[in-house]
Amino acid sequence: MLAPVPAQGAALPHEPRAAASLPRRAAAAGLDLLVVGTLAKLASLAATRVGWPEPPDALHWHLRSLATLSVPIWLYLTLGEALPGSATLGKRALGLRVVDTYGGRLPLGRTALRALLKLGPLLLAQVACAYPTPITELGTAPMPRLLVAAYAALGLYVATAMMSLKKQSVHDWATSSYVIRSPVPSR
C-alpha cells in the first residue's frame, strides 16, 4: 500500500524549511527578553530575600550577576530549545523553532552549547562591567576595552546572520543549527 501524499505545503517529518527572517527572530528575541528579564528580576529578588547582601566588591558583583542573570537566561534558552517543540516561548509565539541541518531536533548538549555561545557578548559585557571595579562605581571613567569587545562580538553575530543564506549567526554555525519558520509540531 502506498503512503498518503501530504497536502500541498505540508512538511514531511524532518524536512528542512525556509529559514526564519531576521526581523521575526528579533521579535522572538524581544519576547524572550521580557520572559528572561522577569526571571532575572525574580532571581535577584530571591537572592536579596535570602539575605544575599549587595555586592561589596567586583568579584561578588560578578558572581551575583552570573547567578541572577546569566544562569537563568542560559537555562531558559537551553531547556526551551531542547524540549519537544524546539522553541523558547518567544519563538513559539511567532511560529519559529530551532532545527539541526537535517530539520530534526537538537540534542540537549548542542542546545546548551548554542545558548552559551549566544550569551557570549553578554558574558563579555558582564565581565567588562565588573572588573576591576563595577561600572556603577566608575562614574566618568572611560569604557573598558572588554566592553568594546562585547559590542564587536554582538556586531559579528548580527553581521553573520545578515550575510548567511539560512540567516545563521555564530551560535547557529557552531552547533550546525538554524531557526525556521514553522509551527511547533503537535504531539
Image (cartoon, grey):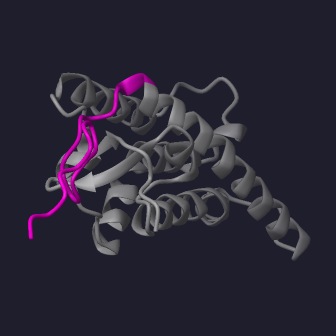
Judged left or right of residue 37, residue 18 is left
Residue drawn at 82 percent across, 71 percent down: 52
31 lies above or below 76: above
Residue 62 point in image, percent of width and height: 60, 58
Judged left or right of residue 62, residue 4 is left
Residue 108 point in image, percent of width and height: 35, 73
60 lies above or below 123: below
Residue 55 visible within the image: no
Residue drawn at 57 percent across, 42 percent down: 93
Residue 137 point in image, percent of width and height: 71, 40
Quadrant of the image occupied by residue 22 = top left
Judged left or right of residue 85, residue 109 is left
Residue 67 visible within the image: yes
The outermost residue toward the front is 1
85 lies above or below 146: below
In the foreground, 48 or 118: 118
Magenta stretch containing residue 15, yes or no? yes
In the foreground, 92 or 186: 186
The outermost residue toward the left is 1
Residue drawn at 75 percent across, 64 percent down: 43
Residue 183 point in image, percent of width and height: 43, 46
Quadrant of the image occupied by residue 19 = top left
Q: Tell me where the magenta segment starts and ends, as one range.
A: 1-23
In the foreground, 86 or 141: 86
In the foreground, 120 or 184: 184
What kind of secondary structure does the magenta stretch mostly adopt? loop
Quadrant of the image occupied by residue 10 = top left
Quadrant (top left/top right/bottom left/bottom right) for the N terminus:
bottom left
